[in-house]
Each structure stands twice: as C-alpha cells, then as structure tokens.
Image (cartoon, helix red, strand yellow):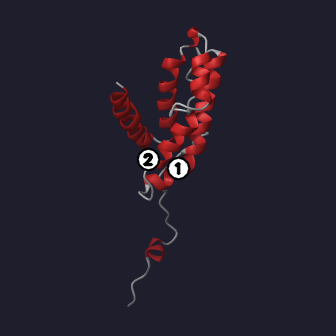
C-alpha cells in the first residue's frame, strides 16, 4: 500500500496558519503622538515614509535569513540624512527650539523602525546608537 501525501491524509481538515502580520502602513495604534506640533508631526511622517520605503519591502527576506539588515540600515540612514547630509539635518538645525527635534528625531526613528521590524531596530540601535555614539565622542 502506497503512503498518502500529507494533504491527502488531512482530507478536508485544515489547520489555520499563523495570524498574518499586518502591513507596516496599517495603523495599529492611532496617533500615539497626541502632543506633537505641526513641525514635529511633519518630521515624524517623513521618518515614517522613509522607513516604510527603504526597509518595509525587505523585512520578509531579512526574517527568513535571506538578507542582512545592514545595507538597508545604511540606505535608511542616508535617506534620513543621518550621515550628516540631507533634508532632515537641515530641518533640525532650522527648527524652533520648542520643537525639540534633537530629542524627537532619534526617538521617532526608533519607534518607526520598530513599527516595521523590531529585529532591525536592534541592529540599528547597536550600529548607530552604541557604536556611532561612542565614536562621535
């Protein structure tokens, strides 16, 4: 007697798969920044757009071990102007002191990366937080 395939043995029974991961653009938490100024909200939205564009399409490959996060972190840093060039550093320098972008930007980058992929946040934190911060000092 020939063994039946798994699908044939299962017959009409189906087991539900794991719950699907929501797309990064799905707003799981409504605006968690209720106190932001218009400038802060614009900066946050810019960070969110860049993170979703540069990182979002590659999350599945990274989670399956087919890609490392570092090239995407570099592109993300370049897109955010964290290499010292770009629109974001200029906006931070020109912002009013009450906008406190020097505190908002690093926190928003971390929050927005975590929205897309928590594992990349760890790599980003080590690369740009611990290492780059120590080198700058």
Q: Where does residue 127 sit, x and y in percent of width and height?
A: 38, 38
Q: Where does residue 115 sit, x and y in percent of width and height?
A: 51, 36
Q: Where does residue 77 sit, x and y in percent of width and height?
A: 51, 37
Q: Where does residue 80 sit, x and y in percent of width and height?
A: 56, 34
Vertical comparison of 54 with 43: above or below = below
Looking at the figure, which quarter contains the C terminus?
top left
Q: On the picture, is 6 further left or further right than 112?
A: left
Camera-side mark, 1 or 2: 2
Residues packed near mark 1 inside 10 Å, few (<14), some (14 to 19) or many (20 plus): few
**Are the residues flagged by discs 1 and 2 in contact, CB closer than 8 Å?**
no
In this view, the residue in front, 93 or 117, is 93
Identity of the residue drawn at 52% across and 27% down:
108
- Check disc 1 and report the residue beneath it: 20
Q: On the picture, is 130 further left or further right than 12?
A: left
In this view, the residue in front, 97 or 117, is 97
- Check disc 2 and report the residue beneath it: 70
Real-space CA distance between mark 1 and mark 2, rounded to the nearest whole angstrom: 26 Å
Q: On the picture, is 33 further left or further right than 129?
A: right
Vertical comparison of 110 with 52: above or below = above
Instruction: Assign a secondary structure to mark 1.
Output: loop
Instruction: Assign a secondary structure to mark 2.
Output: helix
Looking at the figure, which quarter contains the N terminus?
bottom left
Identity of the residue drawn at 60% across and 38% down:
50
In this view, the residue in front, 38 or 19, is 38
């Amino acid at each position: 007697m020939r063994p039946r395939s798994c699908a044939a043995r299962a017959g009409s029974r189906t087991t539900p798969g794991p719950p699907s991961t929501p797309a990064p653009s799905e707003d799981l938490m409504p605006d968690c920044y209720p106190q932001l100024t218009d400038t802060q909200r614009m900066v946050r939205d810019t960070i969110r757009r860049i993170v979703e564009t540069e990182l979002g399409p590659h999350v599945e490959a990274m989670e399956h071990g087919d890609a490392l996060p570092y090239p995407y972190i570099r592109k993300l840093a370049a897109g955010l102007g964290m290499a010292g060039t770009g629109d974001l550093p200029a906006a931070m320098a020109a912002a009013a002191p009450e906008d406190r972008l020097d505190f908002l930007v690093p926190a928003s980058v971390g929050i927005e990366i975590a929205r897309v992929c928590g594992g990349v946040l760890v790599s980003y934190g080590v690369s740009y937080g611990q290492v780059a911060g120590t080198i700058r000092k």
